[in-house]
Amino acid sequence: MAGSHVAQTTRQLAVLRAEHRITGVELDVPAVLNATNPGRVVAEAARQAADALSRSDVLLYTSRAVELGSTAEDSLSVGRTISAALASVVRQVVSGSAGGPAWIVAKGGITAHDVAVHGLGMRRAEVAGQLFPGMISVFRPLDAAQAIGVPYVVFPGNVGDDATLAQVVRIMNAAGGR
């Protein structure tokens, strides 16, 4: 999943989608922020992702336009709202899917933290290693009930070149994913 909205992530997403058979599910940020019931928007994204997971890899991503508040505090609140929505989608998909994902890549530092803690309930993990030296780490959750042992890749937003995310997906699929 990709919560990072930096230009590097957007380019990486484009390469990933061009090179892999993957189903994209967009979490519509303006819809989450402006809906009278944002839970419906989140539930629909979760339904789409869960349905697609049985057929292909799934890319859950936030819409690419950056939404800012009128003040720095409002902008922080927007970020928290979107991060919570992504975590909720992941929680619903992992708890509602038969078999669940073979692996998870979280693109964006805050996204990776919030999805691990709030989406998966992860509090402890084993460090499995790095996919690229000093850049991208792989963990195995030890206490996330629905994802124990599922490789969890932490991929910061402004890391790698345009093809690095596609390389990560190739590595994860070769290691036993789809």
Image (cartoon, helix red, strand yellow):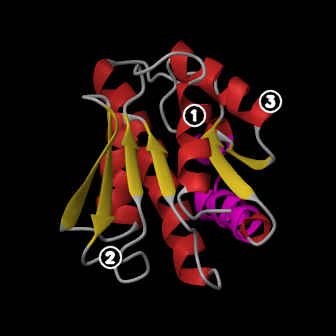
* Residue under label 1: 167
| Three-letter amino acid code of the residue under disc 2 | Ala
Q: Residue 18 carries which label?
A: 3
The reply to whether callout 2 and callout 3 are in contact (CB within 8 Å) is no
> What whole-number distance in Å separates the C-alpha atoms at marks 1 and 2?
26 Å
Q: Earlier in the sequence, mark 3 or mark 1?
A: 3
Horizontal side, residue 29 vs residue 123: left or right:
right
The image shows residue 142, relative to residue 66, as above or below, that is: below
Residue 1 visible (yes or no):
no
Q: Which of 138 and 114 is in front in this view?
A: 138
| Three-letter amino acid code of the residue under disc 3 | Ala
Q: Which of marks 1 and 2 is nearer the N terminus?
A: 2
Horizontal side, residue 145 vs residue 48: left or right:
left
Q: Which of 85 and 49 is in front in this view?
A: 49
The image shows residue 106, relative to residue 158, as above or below, that is: below
Please state the extent of the stretch shown in magenta in the rendering: 31-50
Q: Quadrant of residue 178?
A: bottom right
Q: Residue 148 carries which label?
A: none
Secondary structure category for the residue under label 3: helix
| Three-letter amino acid code of the residue under disc 1 | Gln
* Residue under label 2: 144
The reply to whether callout 3 and callout 1 are in contact (CB within 8 Å) is no
